[in-house]
Amino acid sequence: MFHLWNMQDLTPGLTGAPAPAPVSPALRRRPSKSRWRNRRLVLALMSPWIVGFAVFIAYPLVMSVYLSFTHYDLLNPPRWIGLANYKYLFGDDWHQIRSSIYNTLWIIVVGVPLQVLFSFGIAVMLTRARLGVGFFRTVFYLPALAPPVAATLGFVYLLNPATGPVNTLLKWFGIQGPLWFNDPGWAKPSLVILGVWGIGNTMVIFLAAVLDVPRHLYESADLDGAGPWQRLRYVTIPSISPVILFSVVLGVIQGLQYFTQAYVAAGVAAGEASQAGGTSTLELGYPQGSTLFYPILLYHHGFEFFQMGYASAMAVLLLVVSFVLTFIIIRNSRRWVHYGGAVR
Amino acid sequence: MTSAAVPVGSRELTRRKVPRDVRRRRFLIAVADHSILIAAALLFLLPFVFIVLTAMMTNNQALSAHLWPHPFRWHNFVDVFTQAPLWRWTLNTMIYATLATVGVVVSSVPVAYALSKLRWKGRDMVFLVVLVALMLPPQVSVVPLYVMWAKLGNAIGIQFIGTLWPLIIPAWLGDAFSIFLLRQFFLTIPEEYLDAARVDGCGEYRILATVVLRLAKPAIAAVALFSVLYTFNDFFLPLLYTSNNAHNWPVSVGLSQFRNLHQVQWNLTMAATLLVMAPVIVLFFLAQRAFVEGVTLTGVKG
């Protein structure tokens, strides 16, 4: 839910001129003593974060790496097994790991561009509207407020193959609706639709960005005889490219953590099928592993089978991949992101 | 349109000269724009409509192709509470949301103040670390943390696994997103205000407690709001820590198990879904300003 796209503006201390230091008279007279006092003050104010960072971020990261080289089931002490977890991950278990990576990449590669496209499209349409802008804005924003579990439950019902409202509506038009969450080919697209429904936050950011594009740029484009498409292509999109980059990066990061919707949808849809007399046991990534995303597999190994060592190895891989992906996107973005007025 | 008094450029001339077909064209474009918006808005509203309608159907009807509740069954909203411990889950969520939100605000304000209004060596480095922490997937650190809570519980004889404490306690030790948001706001507070207080002999703690807190009220409201929303929606970590103890489930976990657990019917499931969505939507309409403030703070302002 955080929005930080203009990294250059975020850190005036890093890039801009430093703000003048508050100098109290006491500081000038006895520099050493007051500097020590200042340091103590900073330490006191920073102490929550220092403790929080050490205990809840630094320690688990180091421990994850250590545990990934061990066999650990929570009951017996961790046993050092070297690279065995990684060998298993890339060896015997690779088949399942690969399909979870494939599903995760699928949801990122298909979902993120669609979300950006719809957010941008709706934002542009909202800037063109003259009547009821506030109403439309609220309507497009509201789904983002629906709690993920509730929204997912709603969608599993809406897309219920037999009697769900969506397939009922489609039947009115003579279309035989798909099996949605019960069809391995349609489960991921259904999740993407759910994602597009909840683009409110991104849409609001795009709206602010589109409204922020300087008027004079459009006026000069008009003078050069640009049509609406050209204005969009050569003025709007370059001007808001940092926002596009921001939402792509954020979308990728969230895609790597994709859990709630897939977990709930698979669980409920599988329960539905078993009630209807189909399969009985809940299978992983129902239907047929099509919603088996990487975080779900990690959860499965770590907290359903308590293979803590193996789950740690998966976590280390996730950490490496998320850093590499973020790095690649930001690196390549220099080619297409235009920072207005910034050096670069 | 344009009056004669306005300095006339070539564009103004054309705009004034050809009113008829240009105006017609513009009108048609506006109609097209609004039609697209209305169609899209209907698609976005439709899921809500169906959830509301189904929540008031009988079970047989929820499983039929009829879309409009035939007898409106208001009793569903009562049955929901007898079918599942919805009150208990709501209470758990409220405890989690309250304790975590108070903790986030209390612990993040001083950190954000030190990161924005005091000058010290390594400050920008530390802020970068906060930003990196913001990006970290929770799955990366979750295994050692689970082990840590399990062991700590065994060591001191109080079980943390099965409760929401492993989520509440970290909230009291600074939250990266809130620190980031508050810092962005504190940067906009003019240094002169603080210097004036310093000249008057005000210590930094008192400046923070009086001047800054008073000026930063909207930002603190936004942080608190986001924190409440986050805890309300949080699913992965509560599932992880409490799944073995249904007594401590928050609403999000309870709702996800609602249907499979009791073989509950769709109409009741949708009634529960609606009841879970409602508070957030009501909160939005009550606190629209804080929402807008928050989104503006995190995004538009640098």
Image (spheres, coloured by chain):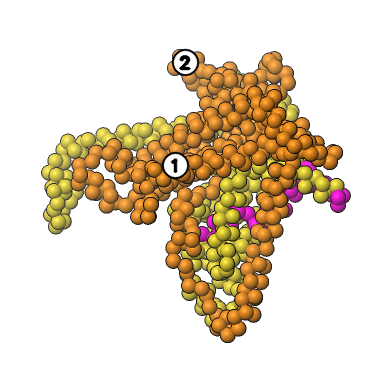
Chain colours: A orange, B yellow
* Residue at point 36%, 39% (across, down): A125
Front-most of residues A116 and A60: A60
Label 1 SS = helix
SS for callout 2: loop
Residue drawn at x 56%, y 56% is: B128
Q: Position of residue A170 (x, y in %)?
A: 48, 19
Chain of the residue under the numbered disc 2 shown in the image: A
Name which residue lies at 58% across and 19% down: A183
Sequence-earlier tag: 2 or 1: 2
Q: Is residue A173 in the magenta section?
A: no
Res B92 seen here: no
Instruction: Name the outermost residue toward the bottom.
Output: A29
Q: Position of residue A200 (x, y in %)?
A: 49, 41
The chain ID associated with circle 1 is: A
Q: Is residue A222 left or right of residue B46?
A: left
- Residue A175 has which mark? 2
Instruction: Report the amino acid beneath label 1.
Output: Asn
Q: Which residues are magenta?
A: B155-184
Relative image position of residue A240 (x, y in whole percent): 38, 46
Residue A191 located left or right of residue A225: right
* Viewer-nearest residue: B227 or B81: B227
Name the residue type under label 2.
Answer: Ile
Q: Nearer the viewer, residue A51 or B67?
A: A51
In three-dimensional space, the C-alpha distance between marks 2 and 1, rounded to whole angstroms, equals 43 Å
Please give the label number shown on residue A332.
1
